Image (cartoon, helix red, strand yellow):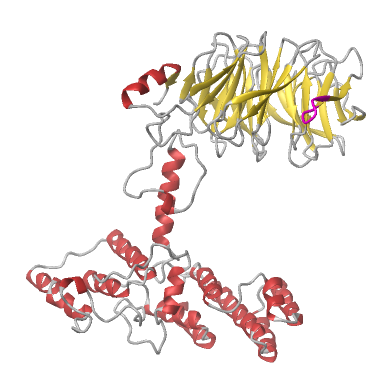
Amino acid sequence: MQSNGAGQGQDSELSCLNSAQNGESSSAGGTHSNGLLASTNIGNSVGTNNGAGPGSGTSAASTASGSGLEVGSMKKKKRLSQAEEDVIRLIGQHLHGLGLNQTVDLLMQESGCRLEHTSATKFRNHVMEGEWDKAENDLNELRALMHSPNAIVRMKFLLLQQKYLEYLEDGRVLEALQVLRGELTPLKYNTDRIHVLSGYLMCSHAEDLRAKAEWEGKGTNSRCRLLDKLQTYLPPSVMLPPRRLQTLLRQAVELQRDRCLYHNTKLDSSLDSVSLLLDHVCSRSATHSGKQFPCYTQQILTEHCNEVWFCKFSNDGTKLATGSKDTTVIVWQVDPESHQLKLLRTLEGHAYGVSYLAWSPDDAFLIACGPDDCSELWLWNIQTGELRTKMSQSHEDSLTSVAWNPDGKRFVTGGQRGQFYQCDLDGNLLDSWEGVRVQCLWCLGDGRTVLASDTHQRIRGYNFEDLTDRNIVQEDHPVMSFTVSKNGRLALLNVATQGVHLWDLQDRVLVRKYQGVTQGFYTIHSCFGGHNEDFIASGSEDHKVYIWHRRSELPIAELTGHTRTVNCVSWNPAIPGLMASASDDGTVRVWGPAPFLDAQEVDGVNENCSNMDS
């Protein structure tokens, strides 16, 4: 075929664009055998590479009759199945979108298929040409082919709405008013929308109309969008949904990515980013596409001189805070290029040790809490290294957990002795809830609801504004810690003697129990991680870090290297291939993707990253 370079860089509206530009009108030559009108800019010849020059006059029909039809006359034509016909139509639609209309003609002629119903083709062309009266008449022909009689009214409303807006843009106000009063209103459909449309009569100029109506204006783009909406009311046997082949291919790619246990890159809906010739597969090894998966110890931080109880990356991923039994908090800077961590500053004076840390939403402040017998809370200014607030309501208090309100101006804190406070940045008590023995806290994104796990093996939601509370999660064993996904839908619980559980907070159901981790009555903190929070990681009393895909109960990796209990893990929210773990062995391990290795060297890397693929 003659190469025309069509299709590689064209946008998603190309199928409609070609319909308009390639002459789908009454003045643009004859109708193709596929039911679509002929292109004026493709040319009349087929296959200059086969020796037929531009002036040879070799037509699509004669080419077909000179080859394929002769073969067909010698043997009976195979009857196509419904699936085969569907595939041919999909291919034909895609080729038509690329402007290869003569190729579509040959495909439909040889297969005996029809790309779409002739009435639908007529309707498409009239819509794209803005011939609204003819398009309305086409609806009467399409009525018999439709499953829902009410769909005709909806389609007519969409047509008239476009007609009305185009008249307004052209300054034909009286005609637009006639459409509104004489055609749209009598439909008695979507009166609220009609009231909105009537307001557009007051627009002083076309730009004002387009802005208020959130409409692209008269032309190919807006008519393409209209046609996409109209096609949803037509059965696919009459007119294929727009760009159907691309949609199916995209769904297939997304499904393969969704099933890939190691996929840890940003989701890209573009088909240009993948190969359609191979199934998608990722591996932890850097020799494959899973180079973003953290399974390799890239750094060991040894500056703490006692057990490290907690670690947490800042919200922007540029820093890591670690808290230790040695009474210090160390803040580390993450190098944006090498992802190596460098000591930024040490915050001292936490007499009981540091067992919990919380970054403010803007990462300007860091709150540190101690273990059960600690009644104090420290609020540090990270930019200056100065102590902003040291809060203690009573020496009898136990302030072991904290969570920031999304507004960054308040926080909640509490402990197992029955304290549950809401405070400002100066430590002033704003509200309190009596008798709640708090194990762990989290503020939801609505700014009102605080989740608290307590000594009754449950998580309850507390509203400090109207002083209401409700049960959300009920476990059979103590909830040692929990964390919540970014969208606030899922909660990840570390449950004593049970391990890691995933709950749906909206439906209030247990979604999954993850296997492998050793969890007794120590407080171990797990986390969500990866580009789309598709992964879950947790420490363990057997000295390992376990990683699961969120949908898989079995771990996909066990990271070894620590020599005592791993108390906490934190996945960098901005660098999906970076994770940290804190352990009683006094170290913090920073995990990253395995470096690029030859195949024979991969086994050595995997010694500290056991494969649990099933």
Query: What residue appears at the point 36 percent right and 70 percent down from the top-left corner?
Result: 96
Apparent side of residue 146 relative to residue 431 in the rendered image (left or right) = left
Q: Quadrant of the N terminus?
A: bottom left
Q: Depth check: 300 or 46 in front?
A: 300
Q: Depth check: 447 or 319 in front?
A: 319
Which residues lie in the magenta part?
Answer: 381-386
Q: Is residue 79 above or below residue 529?
A: below
Measured as percent of width and height from the top left, residue 260 is found at 43, 37
Q: Depth check: 9 or 259 in front?
A: 9
Measured as percent of width and height from the top left, residue 437 is found at 80, 19
Apparent side of residue 324 relative to residue 140 in the rendered image (left or right) = right
Measured as percent of width and height from the top left, residue 435 is found at 86, 21
Q: Quadrant of residue 53?
A: bottom left
**Residue 357 on the magenta segment:** no
Query: What residue appears at the point 22 percent right and 78 percent down from the top-left corner?
Result: 60
Q: Quadrant of the C terminus?
A: top left
Q: Is residue 442 above or below residue 267?
A: above
Q: Is residue 516 above or below residue 530?
A: above
Q: Quadrant of residue 92?
A: bottom left
Magenta stretch, overall SS = loop
Instruction: Give the number of marks.
Output: 0
Measured as percent of width and height from the top left, residue 152 is found at 54, 76
